[in-house]
Amino acid sequence: MANPTIAIVGRPNVGKSTLFNRIAGERISIVEDTPGVTRDRIYATGEWLGKEFSIIDTGGIDLGDEPFMDQIRHQAEIAIEEADVIIFVGSGQEGVTDADELVARILFKSNKPVILAVNKVDNPEMRNEIYEFYSLGLGDPYPVSGSHGLGLGDVLDEAIRHFSTEIEPEEEGVIKFSLIGRPNVGKSSLINGILGEERVIVSEIEGTTRDAVDTHFVGENGQKFTMIDTAGMRKRGKVYESTEKYSVMRAMRAIERSDIVLFVINAEEGIREQDKRIAGYAHEAGRGLIIVVNKWDLVKKDTNSMRDFEQEIRDEFQYLDYAPIIFVSAVTRQRLNKLPELIERVSESQNLRIPSSVLNDVIMDAVAINPTPTDKGRRLKIFYSTQVAVKPPAFVIFVNEEELMHFSYARFLENQIRNAFTFEGTPIRIIARRRK
């Protein structure tokens, strides 16, 4: 089930990004300092009073050379389309402007809950400056200070009050997957190809994401699948899919609802910077991942073409060394019949559980091969290991001092676990904890 989504909207220079970073807090930090994992965030996960939500910073959506007021209008429309709750940010230092009134008129017609936050109210004397914001007709203004974190609790209290309490029922044994990638990599054609011959479409019902249709079908061996159709997730009227950051945001919504992500690359165009950004999100979210190289029929080939392209992918996406690569063509249907089987294999890896006794044998053998590191005379000691989660598989390793578990040694242990067991297509997490 997708988390509720909060969008932050307002004209430039009112402090939207400061509020975004303050709300997202620790959760916006990069999980791994490895090449290709994006630092350019307009979408993050936050938490308040035990409730998780997604948060969008519309100020990060670049709409090119459009006029100033048009940009503001379009960013507000994006927020209306994507969000369950909207935080409209004004500036207490500058008061109500024409641009504020424009955004307020758009939001007023949206029928979405709108919370009015007046930022840059950095001291109590400035609270008297917020009352003119009542003129916008959006209810009580909340004074906040993004730079000091003041007043945000009241805003978030009001935001989570509007979250839906309905729980989407989860059907047992269904594998949910989506196709993500840059525009024009052939996602729609692949979807049609996957649903082609010998596939029984069970139903098409609306998903929890607006304007998306989840397609349910059964594979040849009876396995049930739900395909989250990102191709249908577009704004009625003006389409913002050509905006790079917006298409990344759309991919994030699909990733959030998926068990497994098919990351599609255009073989004809090769790897682009945006590919790394989108793949980085899927990796950080802990989803199963398959790299699908589409339009392989259009590439001029020699005997080494596939091997060379695969090596390029491995070089550019070093943090995805666990992800299988498949070369397909939506037009000629080359290897499309292998995708459902590959998705099933990745799903099995995601849900694989390793008995603690077997896991500890592997860890002890790894330590014998490569002794634990030392730092300033202190040596890392590993006492015990156990698996604590699946999807993705997570392993807690109890040690004497957590800080002695260097990233490189954790990666070595991960590789030894992968060598011993089949974890195809899924990230795994190594968590060091001090033994009490």
Image: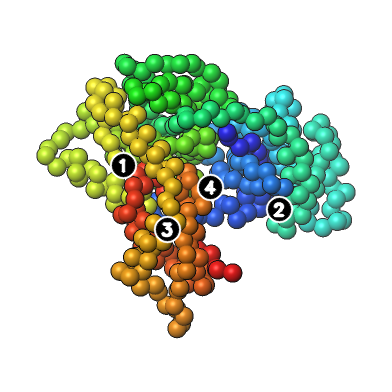
Q: Upstream in the sequence, badge 4 or badge 3?
A: 4
Q: Upstream in the sequence, badge 1 or badge 3?
A: 1
Q: Nearer the viewer, mark 3 or mark 2?
A: 3
In the orientation shown, which residue stands out farthest toward the bottom? 377
Give the amino acid type for the residue marked by disc 1 in the picture: Pro
| Residue positioned 66% across, 47% down in the render | 47
Q: CA distance from mark 4 to mark 3?
A: 41 Å
Q: CA distance from mark 2 to mark 4?
A: 17 Å
Does dot 1 land on a helix, a strand or a loop? Answer: loop
Mark 4–mark 3 CB contact (< 8 Å) = no
In the orientation shown, which residue stands out farthest toward the left? 303
Q: Upstream in the sequence, badge 2 or badge 1?
A: 2
Give the amino acid type for the residue marked by disc 4 in the picture: Arg
Task: Tell me the quarter of the picture where residue 282 sits.
Answer: top left
| Residue positioned 74% across, 34% down in the render | 162
Q: Upstream in the sequence, badge 1 or badge 4?
A: 4
Q: Upstream in the sequence, badge 3 or badge 2?
A: 2
Give the amino acid type for the residue marked by disc 3 in the picture: Ser
Residue 348, position as x, y percentages in the image: 39, 39
Q: CA distance from mark 1 to mark 3?
A: 29 Å
Q: Nearer the viewer, residue 412 or 35?
A: 412
Question: Disc 2 designates what residue?
Answer: 146
Horizontal side of residue 57 vs 132, given as left or right:
left
| Residue positioned 24% across, 44% down in the render | 310
Mark 1–mark 3 CB contact (< 8 Å) = no
| Residue positioned 50% across, 65% down in the render | 398
* As drawn, 238 above or below 64: above
Question: Disc 3 designates what residue?
Answer: 357
In this orientation, does residue 311 appear?
Answer: yes
Crowdedness near tag 1: few (<14), some (14–19) or many (≥20) residues, C-alpha within 10 Å: some
Question: Disc 4 designates what residue?
Answer: 41
Question: Disc 1 designates what residue?
Answer: 324
